[in-house]
Image (spheres, rainbow, N blue to C red):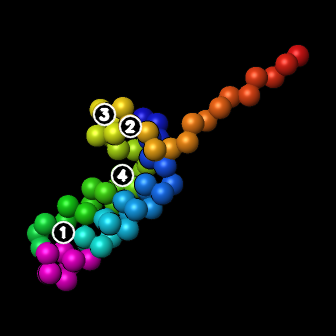
Amino acid sequence: MSTNEGLADRVIRVIIGLVLIALAVTGRWAPWGWIGVLPLITGLVGFCGLYQILGIKTCPMKTEKHQQS
């Protein structure tokens, strides 16, 4: 399982997750607010299963530097 979310994507997911959970805790949007756990976890981990299935990557490509001997 490799990271397939970029920094901006991860920050947005964490913020959305926390807002939805806060709405559920305060009773304003319960029980649907608990769905905020999903974006919170995917944002913290950096991996989204749906992105994997669809072949989407928002993280920058890592390049390997070849050493010359």
Q: Residues within 10 Å of mark 2 (few under 14, many from 20)?
A: few
Q: Which residues are magenta?
A: 22-29
Estimate the spatial distance between the alpha carbons at disc 4 and disc 3, rounded to whole Å.
Answer: 16 Å
- Is the residue 34 above or below the residue 68 in the image? below
Give the percent coordinates (x, y) of residue 27.
14, 81
Label 1: how many Cα within 10 Å (few below 14, some 14–19, many 20+): many
Residue with the most extreme right position: 69
What residue sits right under mark 2 in the picture? 56
Q: Nearer the viewer, mark 2 or mark 4?
A: 2
**Mark pair 4, 1: CA separation:** 16 Å
Residue extending farthest top? 69
Q: Is residue 10 left or right of residue 60?
A: left
- Kind of residue at disc 3: Leu
The residue identified by callout 1 is 33
Secondary element under disc 1, as helix, strand or loop, is helix
Whether residues under marks 2 and 3 lie with C-beta atoms below 8 angstroms apart, the answer is yes
Query: Residue beneath label 4, please?
Result: 42
Question: Residue drawn at (45%, 62%), measured in percent from left and top?
Answer: 11
Displayed quadrant of residue 14: bottom left
Q: Which residue is mark 3?
A: 54
Task: Pinpoint residue 15: horizontal percent, then vertical percent.
Answer: 38, 68
Instruction: State yes or no: residue 25 in magenta.
Output: yes
Tag 4: amino acid: Thr
Q: Amino acid at mark 2?
A: Ile
Between the residue at mark 2 and the residue at mark 3, the CA separation in whole angstroms equals 6 Å
Closer to the chain start, of discs 4 and 1, is: 1
